[in-house]
Amino acid sequence: MRRVHLIGIGPGSPGLITVRAAETIRGADVIRHPPGVDVAILALARPGAVLGPAKGWEEIVQLAQHDHRVAVLFRGDPFTFGDGAGLAEALREEGIEFEVVPGVLAEAAGPAISGISADLLGKPGGPGETGAFRVTAGEVPARVAALLADGHPPDAQAAVILNPGAPGQRKVLAPLRHLAGAAAEHLEGDLVIVVGPGVEQARRLDSLAGRPLHGRRVLVTRARHQAEEFHRHLAELGAWVIDIPTIEVRPLRVDATVRDAIARLDETHLVVFASANSVEIFFDMLFELRRDARALRNSRLCAIGPETARTLEAHGLRPELVSGEYTAEGLAETLGNWDLTNARILVPRARQNRDALPAILAKRGAEVEILPVYELACPAGAPGALHALFEEDPVDAVTFTSTATVVNFAGAFATEELATLLEKTRVACMGPVTADTARRLGMRVDIIAGEYTTRGLAQAVASHFNP
């Protein structure tokens, strides 16, 4: 079915687009967008999707006629203060189905985030009403003069919302007659002016300004299916979060090796889960072979890191040991005084991992089987999205939750670029092993989480910027 999606992306924040907008972007073959769209929104596109700036309605119609699934992005909302209605008319005349995905307006998002309640959006309102409307920086003095001429009291509370709904949103409050002068040194791009009684709430109800990461842009490189919790922790601290995953997890198929390892669980003394991914994929393999958690009844369990332990607990299993980041030496130390003589140990983990664990534990009499259950890859669109992000404006911090995220991030740039690229960006790592990898690849590490969880890393970033 030929269908074009007209998608409102709100003020431009990845965090303010709707779930439906994200779904339709991921499902599109071709994406057309306005200039300056946040690269994290474009990074939602599936591998192989064709992205480019919007050139006109004729192109959209032609693409749809050739059975492409087309997504057309509009700032704010496609119909409200946008030209989506014209495109919709053109599509209707050609008999092409379309769907409108509404978007958040900057006139609504900016004031609300700053604690201001507006009665009218897109209009200045009259005396006694609180109106919010978008203007360009150069229009501010003329708009203030027009508001005064329309009868708004010179001493009425007014605000200019800078970067409304975007990274580093801030507000300038002043009586209306002084507003243009108070905001003069900050004016650039699109702004939202608010005037009326609702502005008085800003000092009491601003939900963002007091948070430790307010105005900070933080890049999350974690795999998309695991990033939601980390994104939420950072956002709750006030950060503007940009998601560009540098790894994706690809489960391996159940083959003879997997079948044999699972068949031998009854005689396996210890199962060491190297990551939360290894837990989820190993259980998927168990279910595919018509087994479940009871297959582990004779095995002791070890989890690498608190998040892996929590994932096991979600399956009703509590590990006897929880170690820190994965290293062969660290795991051997965690096993401590356990008698491993003739013990069979199974380690489900990523295919790429290579270390001395089998040899170290073999010296203690153990038989170790490394069972690859998934492989890690760099998403096809990640290098381009990273280049576009850093060419536009450096982020305040880039976060790494594993050695693979570091390696693939570094691989997107020439070696000599990294130091200059990250000159104004803090590098934050979840634990010393990840930090060592970053340093080995030429990065300066500024932040290391003491607690090896996404919450711990988010708190460490917040503490760095707001001691």
Image: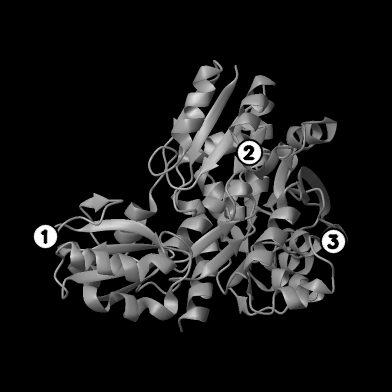
Report how far apart the C-alphas of labels 3 and 2 lie in the structure.
43 Å
Locate residue 160 relative to residue 452 in the image: left or right.
left
Please name the residue shown 60% across and 63% down the image: 219
SS at badge 1 = loop
Locate residue 109 relative to residue 124 in the image: left or right.
right
Q: Is residue 248 above or below residue 156?
A: above
Residue 160 is situated, as x and y percent measured from the top left of the image, at 33, 69
Amino acid type of the residue that numbered disc 2 sits on in the rendered structure: Ile
Report how far apart the C-alphas of labels 1 and 2 lie in the structure.
43 Å
Nearer to us: label 1 or label 2: 1
Assess disc 3: are there few (<14), some (14-19) or many (≥20) residues with their C-alpha within 10 Å of its C-alpha: few
Q: Which mark is residue 31?
A: 2
Q: Are marks 1 and 2 in contact (CB under 8 Å)?
A: no
The one nearer the camera, 66 or 26, is 66
The residue wearing badge 3 is 355
Quadrant placement of the N terminus: top right
Amino acid type of the residue that numbered disc 3 sits on in the rendered structure: Asp
Q: Are marks 1 and 3 in contact (CB under 8 Å)?
A: no
Q: Which mark is residue 128?
A: 1
Please name the residue shown 57% across and 74% down the image: 450
Please name the residue shown 77% across and 31% down the image: 254
Q: Earlier in the sequence, mark 1 or mark 2?
A: 2
Locate residue 286 relative to residue 242 in the image: left or right.
right
Residue 131 is situated, as x and y percent measured from the top left of the image, at 23, 57
Camera sees residue 206: no
Q: Are marks 3 and 2 in contact (CB under 8 Å)?
A: no
Assess disc 2: are there few (<14), some (14-19) or many (≥20) residues with their C-alpha within 10 Å of its C-alpha: many
SS at badge 3 = loop
The one nearer the camera, 2 or 329, is 2
SS at badge 2 = strand
